[in-house]
């Protein structure tokens, strides 16, 4: 059953925001090597599409969505192909080992929620105990927050996007501190993702009698 906070056939403002941020994080940052999807220049290409279904919503939809999309893209294997004249032959996975997508980098999102219980209109400067910034807020905390900030980064220390839709203004110094802390979280998530994928690949390929191939350099 899908999450009851979303309506079938009608995208909420939150869904639209998630979709736009993930598109910018993954597609517009060229996380996927588009040239590697070319089969016949100017004629045929692989069409890769990632659909996200929210089963439950306890906050952190943007971060979870980006993590899920990047995990899925790395886990996916496309059938091997060969070209015979003008014909493209798609081989069965039973006779030809499927191949992974070419991933150039792994962008992940991290979201901060801001709280200012005193209701001051001043910037969040981090020098007052009444001003709070938390990472990975749950749904109840998101409903009460006074603003949010989304970073998209990768382990190459590249800042891909910053998204702040209204809410409390933030001091530049605090922004830099949050970016550094967010990078540590993204590095940890990337490691957990890769460890889980490697474990799955070893089990999956061993059970199917396939050979686990090295794909590119360390990302």
Image: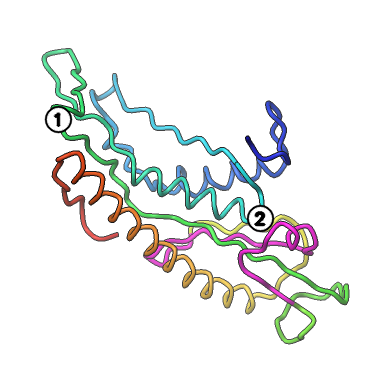
| Towards the viewer: 136 or 156 | 136
What are the residue bounds of the magenta stretch?
A: 132-159
Q: Position of residue 195 (x, y in %)?
A: 33, 60
Disc assigned to residue 202: none
Residue bearing the label numbered 2: 59
Disc assigned to residue 96: 1
Residue extending furthest toward the top: 86
Q: Quadrant of residue 82?
A: top left
Q: Going 82% across and 75% down the picture, which residue do you hit?
A: 122
Residue extending furthest toward the right: 119
- What SS does tag 2 mark? loop
Q: Position of residue 135 (x, y in %)?
A: 62, 68
Q: Crowding near pointer 2: few (<14 within 10 Å), some, many (20+)?
A: some
| Towards the viewer: 155 or 40 | 155
> In the picture provided, is 1 more to the left or to the right than 83?
right
Residue 65 lies, with reference to residue 117, above or below; the image says: above
Which numbered disc flags the more N-terminal residue, 1 or 2? 2
Residue 197 is a magenta residue:
no
Q: Quadrant of residue 211?
A: top left
- What SS does tag 1 mark? loop
| Towards the viewer: 207 or 45 | 207
Quadrant of the snapshot with the N terminus: top right
Residue 135 is a magenta residue:
yes
Q: Position of residue 175 (x, y in %)?
A: 62, 73
Contact (Cβ within 8 Å) of mark 1 with mark 2: no
Q: Going 63% across and 46% down the picture, which residue do you hit?
A: 56
> In the picture provided, is 99 more to the left or to the right than 20?
left
Q: Going 60% across and 41% down the picture, which residue do you hit?
A: 54
Q: Position of residue 83 (x, y in %)?
A: 14, 20
Q: Going 17% across and 27% down the picture, which residue do you hit?
A: 94
> In the picture provided, is 116 more to the left or to the right than 7?
right
């Amino acid at each position: 059953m899908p999450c009851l906070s979303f309506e079938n056939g009608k995208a909420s403002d939150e869904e639209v925001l998630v979709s736009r941020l993930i598109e910018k994080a993954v597609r517009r940052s060229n996380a996927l090597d588009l040239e590697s999807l070319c089969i016949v220049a100017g004629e045929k290409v692989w069409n890769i599409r990632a659909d996200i279904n929210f089963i439950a919503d306890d906050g952190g939809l943007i971060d979870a969505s980006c993590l899920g999309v990047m995990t899925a893209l790395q886990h996916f294997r496309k059938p091997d192909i060969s070209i015979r004249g003008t014909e493209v032959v798609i081989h069965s996975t039973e006779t030809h080992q499927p191949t992974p997508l070419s991933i150039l980098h792994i962008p992940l999102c991290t979201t901060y929620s801001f709280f200012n219980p005193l209701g001051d209109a001043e910037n969040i400067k981090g020098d007052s105990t009444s001003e709070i910034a938390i990472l990975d807020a749950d749904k109840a905390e998101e409903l009460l927050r006074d603003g949010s900030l989304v970073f998209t980064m990768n382990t190459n220390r590249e800042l891909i996007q910053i998204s702040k839709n209204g809410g409390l203004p933030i001091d530049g110094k605090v922004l830099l501190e949050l970016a550094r802390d967010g990078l540590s979280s993204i590095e940890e998530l990337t490691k957990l993702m890769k460890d889980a994928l490697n474990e799955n690949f070893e089990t999956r390929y061993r059970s199917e009698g396939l050979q686990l191939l090295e794909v590119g350099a360390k990302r």
